Image (cartoon, coloured by chain):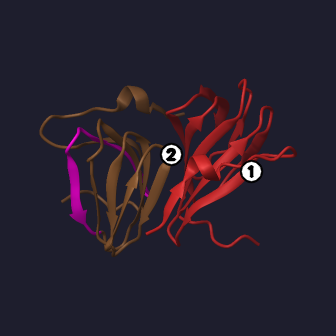
Chain colours: A red, B brown
């Protein structure tokens, strides 16, 4: 069985936020997104996939459509297909977010 | 935007484990599973859906197919479609697990 330990797998880079894959099937993927202070995932949209952002550590500002929320550990939001969404780590430290997306958007081009 | 706070939403019952829905779309659902000490989700199988178990609090024993693992906070496993899986809270306290399943299995009968 596949076991993943997020505390050991989280990884950060100085130039941009880091995506660490935990699980991937043809039906979804589940990643850790790791942000140093000030790093962001710019606003973007998926036409056919829904995404959950679940904060594991730190605090960040999440945008979904025209709304924003500051979320900390154990707080989550949903970015439905067709709605622009993004994240900025404007908190005082590192931000680690568990991300689920389904269906799997398919191989990267 | 939908915001869910898991720390406030987690809920326990004396008779059996509790499922608390966080997000549900036609593509997936995302729940909290809350186990008092000794409670379990019995082994079962989904023919067409993959599931992630991500432990938020406590410790439990997870079974996927013929394998078992003791997982604690920030540890996760995958139960692929067609593979029997279950959870027992044999840890010293409460167990809270974030569960993600896709595709959505559809309305309960």
Q: Tell me which chain the residue with mark 1 is part of.
A: A
Give the labeled residue for mark 1.
A18
Query: Toward the viewer: A69 or B41?
Result: B41
Q: Is residue A65 visible?
A: no
Question: Could you say which quadrant of the image residue A109 lies in?
Answer: bottom right
Say whether residue B11 is left or right of residue B73: left
Query: Toward the viewer: A48 or A103?
Result: A103
- Label 2's element? loop
Q: Position of residue A3 (x, y in %)?
A: 48, 61
At 54% across and 31% down in the image, what residue appears?
A73
Q: Residues within 10 Å of mark 1 (few under 14, many from 20)?
A: many
Please tell me whether residue B36 belongs to the stretch shown in magenta: yes
At 71% across and 25% down in the image, what residue appears?
A91
At 69% across and 44% down in the image, what residue appears?
A34
Asked whether the residues under marks 1 and 2 belong to the same chain, the reply is: no
Tell me the magenta residue range. B25-45
**In the image, which disc is placed on residue B74?**
2
Say whether residue A4 is left or right of residue A108: left
């Amino acid at each position: 069985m596949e076991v993943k330990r997020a505390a050991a797998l989280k990884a950060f880079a100085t130039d941009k936020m880091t995506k660490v894959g935990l699980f991937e099937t043809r039906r979804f993927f589940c990643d850790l997104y790791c942000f140093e202070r000030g790093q962001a995932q710019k606003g973007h949209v998926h036409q056919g996939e829904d995404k959950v952002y679940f904060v594991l550590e730190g605090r960040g500002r999440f945008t979904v459509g025209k709304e924003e929320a500051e979320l900390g550990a154990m707080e989550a939001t949903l970015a439905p297909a067709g709605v622009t969404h993004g994240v900025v780590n404007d908190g005082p430290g590192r931000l680690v977010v568990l991300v689920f997306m389904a269906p799997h958007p398919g191989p990267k081009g």
